[in-house]
Image (cartoon, rainbow, N blue to C red):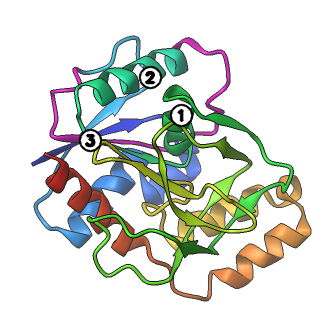
Amino acid sequence: MVIGILDCDKVDPALAVDYGQYGDMFEAGFNRVSPGTQCRIYDAQADSLPSVDECDGWVISGSRHSAYEPLDWIERLGEWTRVAFAAQVPVAGICFGHQLLAQALGGEVRKAEQGWGMGPYDTEVVLQAPWMQGAEPTLRLLSSHQDQVMVLPPDAELLATSAFCPNYSFAIGDRVFTVQGHPEFLIGYNRALAEKRREQIGEAVYQQAIAGFDHPVDSDRFLSWILNFIRQSR
C-alpha cells in the first residue's frame, strides 16, 4: 500500500530543521504506528497534481491558507478532490485538507467567530466509523486553526464534535475521512507554533494551549485510523 501525501504548505525554515515539512511529519507518524508504510510526497501548490490512481490513498495536509482563498492551486486541488471522489479513491483531509474537502464537495468553510484553536482540546466521538478501532468517547488532537467547516457536504456523517468546533471530523462513505486537528504534529512543534503566534492568538488561548500540552493526545491512534481507512476502502 502506497500513501500519497499532498503537502499544502511550507514549514517555517527554523522549525523545519527539527520537524521537517508536513509530508515528512506524516511519513514519520505513519511509520511509527505501522513500520514500513510507503509514502510519496507531492507539492500540492505545484502547477500539476498527480493522477488520483497513482497511490492507493491520499492525505491532504494542513496549510496557512484558507480553502476559500481565490488561488489557482487551491482551485486545482478542489477539482482534484472531486475527481478522486468520483473515482472512489480514498482521501483523508487534515485541518486545511478537512476544510478543502468539505468545500469542494458542497459544504461551507469560513473563519470561526470562536477565534483560534491552538494546542489540544477535547471532542466527543458521536459515530465510530468501521476503521476507527479502539475509539474512546473523547478524541483529543493537537490543533492550530482559525477557519472551520460550518456546513458539512451532502451525505457526510459527523464523527466527532465539540462546542468549540461542531464539525470536527466527518466521513463520506469509505471515500472521505477528515479531521480539524493535526495527528501528524508532535507536541514540540505545536508548542513552537503557539509561541510564535502568541500575540496573534491572544494570551488566553496561548495559556490554554500551554496547559494542554501536559496531557496525552490521540495522535498515533488517529494516524492508525487513516491507514485503516485507506486499507479498508481499497
What's the distance in space between the residues labelled 2 and 3, CA to CA? 15 Å
- Tag shown at residue 114: none
Q: Residue at x 84, y 56 (%)?
A: 114
Please identify the quadrant where the C terminus is shown: top left
Q: Nearer the viewer, residue 78 or 170?
A: 170
Asked if 165 appears above or below 92 in the picture, the reply is: below
Tell me what residue is drawn at x 31 percent, y 82 percent. 134
Q: Is residue 196 left or right of residue 115?
A: left
Q: Which residue is mark 1?
A: 100
Residue 10 visible, this angle: no
Q: Are marks 2 and 1 in contact (CB under 8 Å)?
A: yes
Residue on which disc 2 sits:
77
Q: At 38% across and 28% down in the image, what residue appears?
A: 43
Residue 121 falls inside the magenta stretch = no
Can residue 96 be seen in the rendering of this structure? Answer: yes
Q: Identity of the amino acid at label 1?
A: Leu
